[in-house]
Amino acid sequence: MTQFAYDINDFNLAATELCRYGRTLYQRDWSPATSSNYSIRLNDHCCALTSSGKHKGELTADDILVVDLDGQPLPHPQHKVDARPSAETLLHTQLYRRDPAIGAVLHTHSATAVVLSQLWPEDVLTLQGWELQKAFAGETSHEHPVAIPLFANDQNIDRLATAVEQRMAQQGQGHAYLIRGHGVYTWGKNISECFRHLEALEHLLGYQLQLLQLQQPIGTNNK
Amino acid sequence: MTQFAYDINDFNLAATELCRYGRTLYQRDWSPATSSNYSIRLNDHCCALTSSGKHKGELTADDILVVDLDGQPLPHPQHKVDARPSAETLLHTQLYRRDPAIGAVLHTHSATAVVLSQLWPEDVLTLQGWELQKAFAGETSHEHPVAIPLFANDQNIDRLATAVEQRMAQQGQGHAYLIRGHGVYTWGKNISECFRHLEALEHLLGYQLQLLQLQQPIGTNNK
Amino acid sequence: MTQFAYDINDFNLAATELCRYGRTLYQRDWSPATSSNYSIRLNDHCCALTSSGKHKGELTADDILVVDLDGQPLPHPQHKVDARPSAETLLHTQLYRRDPAIGAVLHTHSATAVVLSQLWPEDVLTLQGWELQKAFAGETSHEHPVAIPLFANDQNIDRLATAVEQRMAQQGQGHAYLIRGHGVYTWGKNISECFRHLEALEHLLGYQLQLLQLQQPIGTNNK
Amino acid sequence: MTQFAYDINDFNLAATELCRYGRTLYQRDWSPATSSNYSIRLNDHCCALTSSGKHKGELTADDILVVDLDGQPLPHPQHKVDARPSAETLLHTQLYRRDPAIGAVLHTHSATAVVLSQLWPEDVLTLQGWELQKAFAGETSHEHPVAIPLFANDQNIDRLATAVEQRMAQQGQGHAYLIRGHGVYTWGKNISECFRHLEALEHLLGYQLQLLQLQQPIGTNNK
């Protein structure tokens, strides 16, 4: 059937996965108080995305919407009347538009990411010397630096998405970025790889935060 | 039946919810060692409230009482002989009396709230610059400051409730307050919103406590 | 039947409880790596006690022994050939001998208790100003100081038990004590109260450890 | 049947155990983002080992391979086409070759082990004064020092395994070692003892990391 701009089986699969990862991410305390949003690409034109303001540990398929890559909602078999796409939809679609190899995006709010992003004085956090960097796709050594850009928080998501795109165009796409006092975005070819990236990133940010607690002055890297 | 001053179905629903949230709050380690108390409004005149001294992860409907908004116990279908309302009942009823839109109150004792409240030198903790502030009902930007008052602990709950009421009358109701070395009170239109507020608050207080660990001197905000 | 010096039903009940609390205490990470031991009084002459070297999250009734109040093993219906009483048996029986109102003893090894006990410079840690002190039986105000003695660790348990008894005889029994670099002992009229004491103590010690992380010099109380 | 160089029942038992411990180690957050590898000796000539790049909380028997003590894969009843031995296989076989009493090896990546190993300035971390040292086989007192060597991380595992062997030949085998910014290796006569060693080690490293957070300068032991 072509009543939707995507294969309904792909949607159902994506919705199941987003709900399942939601439970995991909530239990890890990375998506507290209805924060966070997650998406999975359905095809070249649209992605499945969590709707705004839902408890992320209790998502059901009804809480998953479809948007095109301009962030506009598309008709959806289980669309609830009160469901609206996440306010941060454009930060997801910016990634899907720029790189067809991106199949999933996770945005979360761990206390570690929030505090470290608020404190880090420079506009990039360079990870180096950690074995777990190899969890990012394509990284093969702890000696290769991994740069995580930081952005000021902004309630104007359109403007923020533009800033992210500009930085990536200039400095490369990388594996993840931080929004100060807010959280982290990371992505992967599919939701499983994306989650692996997030899990590694949380550990790596945790290492850096512990170094800050152990060293003065704030913002001096361990290298 | 009008043998009670409230709809028994409302009581049963509230009791079920209070027991369920008790399990969650105990598992989060926010209600250790029989501490904490929780309530849900039943109508304009009374609320359901946890009884004193119970293990909050093992509550049953028998552990839920009903009090009027002066804190006096009302007859109750499952009233245990040994059940008595929480010693802090008046801190719940103070909220229900002042604002008919408040439908639930949670008081908890996380280590984060206790330690931060003990250390914070001023009588208000102002949260600003954190995305998660938007989890409080009506907050729309990380840039808008959220003030959390602090009160000295007092075993005289009547006196403490009066102090809370006076401060709110002067400075506004806000979203939550801290009692030093004791814990936090927060509220919402229903138990679900109230829990969202608590979860956000715990993260926000955790951010502030981490800032204290990373910066000297104690009590200097990050702004 | 009088083939045992205790009621076998009491033993069975105690064994079930000790196994159940073992699972809880292991999950809390307070009894790592087969450490810790727990006991419940059976009568004026003996108590049920965990055997040495068992995984505390996987205890079965076979792992529970009976000792008299001199620490000597008594015949037991499910006595395993390889089971032997905990090396620290005498620290349990010292408590049962001195106070007939003590019905249960928990000895655990949380990282918080171990680190704080190793660092604390004085031979007593005085808790004051914390609402959770009221979780100890008989305490009614955060203003009343609660003294927790500290003892140097000693592989000679007989000598350590004597030191504990002497200190209690001189300074009062209190609610709990710490062994440096080792762990905590606490007790109660039954296992439920004893666990409440332990849970409160872990929070209270956690507060103090956080104060140490936030303040210099080490060992200066917050009062 | 002798179609394999090992008893297939031994393999099945080892695979079941490795999957079970994987779930536990993942839940403890010691094996994030597909990191870590675990092995169990099958006989004098080979061991069962986790394959590379798998989610350690979701291992199945298909993810367990067999290698000889030179690290070469052996035929295997459930060998997946894409399965390859861990890149760090030689760090496991080095241990099995040097000591026939070693029956299991666990390599994990807790944040505690990673951060402490990165910060510790000397090439050995000496644990002393902690009761939990007695969880290591053969240790009978907190007073006996336990030396944990540290090695620089190296993507050349052959070279790293040689460095480990040389250090052990000179300074003794000990109970465990750290690789800086990477993780920990520990071993035991069987997987249960090995896990007990790991659990104790994680607590002991956690104590040391907390001491670092509480004391200046970094790397000064508490003794």
Image (tube, coloured by chain):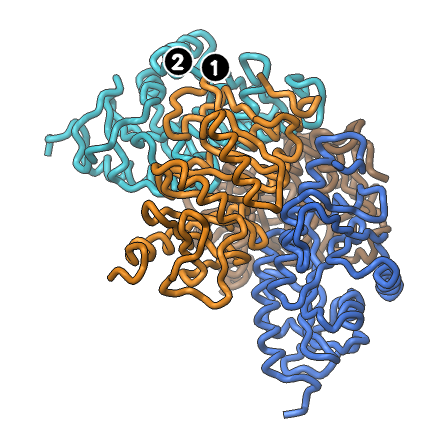
Chain colours: A cyan, B orange, C blue, D brown
Image: A106 above or below B69: above
Residue at left 40%, top 52%?
A: B48
Mark sitting on residue B129: none
Res D168 → quadrant: top right
- How far from the left and from the top, in percent, is residue D146? 80, 46
Residue type of the residue flagged with mark 1: Phe
- How far from the left and from the top, in percent, is residue C4? 68, 87
Image: C158 above or below A165: below
Residue type of the residue flagged with mark 2: Leu
> Marks 2 and 1, Cα distance to the nearest angstrom?
8 Å
Image quarter where the C terminus of chain D lies is top right
Name the residue carrying label 1. A151
The subunit carrying tag 2 is A
- How far from the left and from the top, in percent, is residue B160? 56, 40
Few, some or many C-alpha atoms within 10 Å of disc 2 (few <14, some 14-19, many ≥20)?
A: some
Residue at left 52%, top 56%?
A: B52
- How far from the left and from the top, in percent, is residue B140? 38, 22
Residue at left 70%, top 17%?
A: A217
Whether residues under marks 2 and 1 lie with C-beta atoms below 8 angstroms apart, the answer is yes
Query: Residue D4, can we see it?
Result: no
Query: Circle 1 sits in a helix, a strand or a loop, which is it?
Result: strand
Name the residue carrying label 2. A160
Mark 2 / mark 1, whichever is N-terminal: 1
* Residue B54 vs residue C114, the one in the foreground: B54
